[in-house]
């Protein structure tokens, strides 16, 4: 019988995901969810079948899934749960990250014809955690550019910013380890050490962002379902907000879950208009989902 730590290490391993029946594998995990989440998942799968989304390219599916959740309520800190790190499932309300992440994960489920709730949870853990393995709080991909880097390595997406004229930023990222009091889990010195190692790796490689002044010039190169992060002026932080590209009458607009709006919305105007109107944003990072 595997202990809980061993089960968490196995879960998400590409070599072993299929080694155990889905229900047996997931029974090894502590999870946070409600019956409403499975019901929402099944509604989304029914919608996807009716719209024949599996026949579309992945970016179009990501946009369609994002639009399905228009009007869903915004709730902050949706991934925080008491006790040890666990797989949080919440399809009823979102923060900006969980909205974007779930649109991508659900689109991958549609394309891969994974139609059970257990398969969705496996895919969610694969995208959310470093190398797809849940191994405590530091294994969650907390910084967006690190999330992009890890998911590029897993062939989930590719970083499109450099090809669109992005400039390499070597800004020092250390917000979590310099604000440990803001994170309950970072009362554990071992976790702080692991997060510091993540930050050090990020600082060695940097990231590519398209400056605010150039976003308008690349609008015609953005595609439906592209993942957008807004580069921030905040010290120690890479990105302050994230969302998706949705094309409206040919214009790339920002589909996101903002705190200010209180729900999932499609921003007015183009993405360039949105970024231009926010003084704390200096540009964008861009990730393009890959066909699974």
Image (cartoon, rainbow, N blue to C red):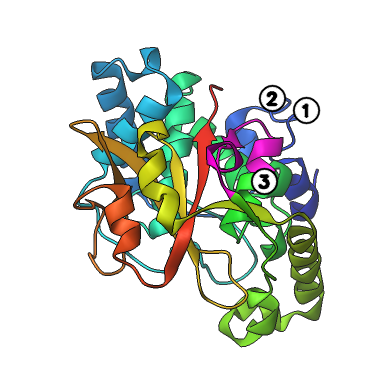
Q: Which label was assigned to residue 15?
A: 1
Q: Is residue 98 visible?
A: no
Name which residue lies at 39% across and 16% down. 54
Q: Are marks 3 and 2 in contact (CB under 8 Å)?
A: no
Start-end of magenta stretch = 150-166
Residue located at (37% from left, 12% from top): 55
Q: Is residue 59 above or below residue 126?
A: above
Q: Quadrant of residue 152?
A: top right
Identify the residue shown where x is 36% and y is 39%. Answer: 219
Q: What residue sits 60% from the left and 60% below the top?
A: 143
| SS under mark 3 | helix
Say few, some or many: other residues with alpha carbon within 10 Å of mark 2 (under 14 / 14 to 19 / 20 or more).
Answer: few
Counting residues from the start of the chain, the first of labels 3 and 1 encountered is 1
Nearer to the camera, 119 or 234: 234
Q: Quadrant of residue 103?
A: top left
The location of residue 216, given as percent across then percent down, is 35, 46
Q: Is residue 173 visible?
A: yes
Query: Could you tell me residue 85's position as x and y percent?
Result: 63, 62
Q: Is 225 located above or below residue 231 in the figure? A: above
The residue under label 2 is: 18
Rounded to the nearest whole Å, what is the CA distance between mark 3 and mark 1? 21 Å
Select label 3 or label 2 by which is in front.
3
Horizontal side of 139 relative to 226 (left or right) equals right
User: For the residues marked 2 and 1, what is the alpha-carbon distance in whole angstroms?
Assistant: 7 Å
- Discs 2/1, front: 1
Q: Residue furthest top?
A: 55
Q: Quadrant of the C terminus?
A: top right
Q: Is residue 79 magenta?
A: no
- Foreground of the two, 206 or 90: 206
Image side of residue 26 versus residue 97, left or right: right
């Amino acid at each position: 019988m595997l202990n809980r730590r061993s089960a968490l290490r196995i879960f998400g391993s590409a070599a072993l995901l299929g080694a155990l029946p889905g229900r047996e594998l997931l029974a090894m995990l502590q999870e946070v969810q409600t019956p409403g989440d499975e019901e929402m998942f099944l509604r989304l799968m029914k919608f996807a079948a009716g719209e024949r989304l599996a026949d579309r390219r992945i970016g179009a599916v990501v946009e369609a899934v994002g639009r399905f959740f228009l009007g869903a309520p915004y709730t902050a800190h949706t991934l925080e749960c008491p006790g040890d790190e666990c797989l949080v499932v919440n399809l009823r309300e979102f923060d900006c990250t969980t909205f974007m992440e779930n649109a991508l994960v659900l689109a991958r489920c549609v394309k891969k014809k994974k139609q059970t709730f257990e398969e969705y949870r496996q895919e969610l853990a694969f995208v959310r955690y470093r190398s797809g393995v849940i191994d405590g709080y530091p294994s969650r991909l907390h910084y967006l550019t690190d999330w992009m880097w890890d998911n590029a390595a897993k062939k989930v997406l590719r970083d499109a910013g450099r090809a669109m004229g992005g400039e390499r930023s070597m800004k020092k990222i250390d917000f979590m380890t310099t604000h440990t009091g803001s994170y309950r889990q970072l009362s554990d010195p071992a976790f702080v050490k692991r997060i510091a190692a993540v930050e050090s790796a990020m600082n060695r490689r940097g990231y590519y962002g398209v400056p605010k002044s150039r976003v308008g010039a690349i609008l015609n190169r953005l595609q439906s379902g592209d993942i957008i992060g807004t580069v921030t002026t905040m010290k120690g932080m890479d990105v302050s907000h994230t969302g998706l590209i949705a094309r409206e009458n040919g214009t790339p607009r920002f589909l996101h879950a903002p705190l200010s709006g209180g729900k999932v919305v499609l921003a007015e105007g183009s993405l360039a208009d949105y970024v231009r109107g926010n003084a704390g944003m200096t540009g964008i990072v861009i990730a393009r989902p890959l066909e699974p």
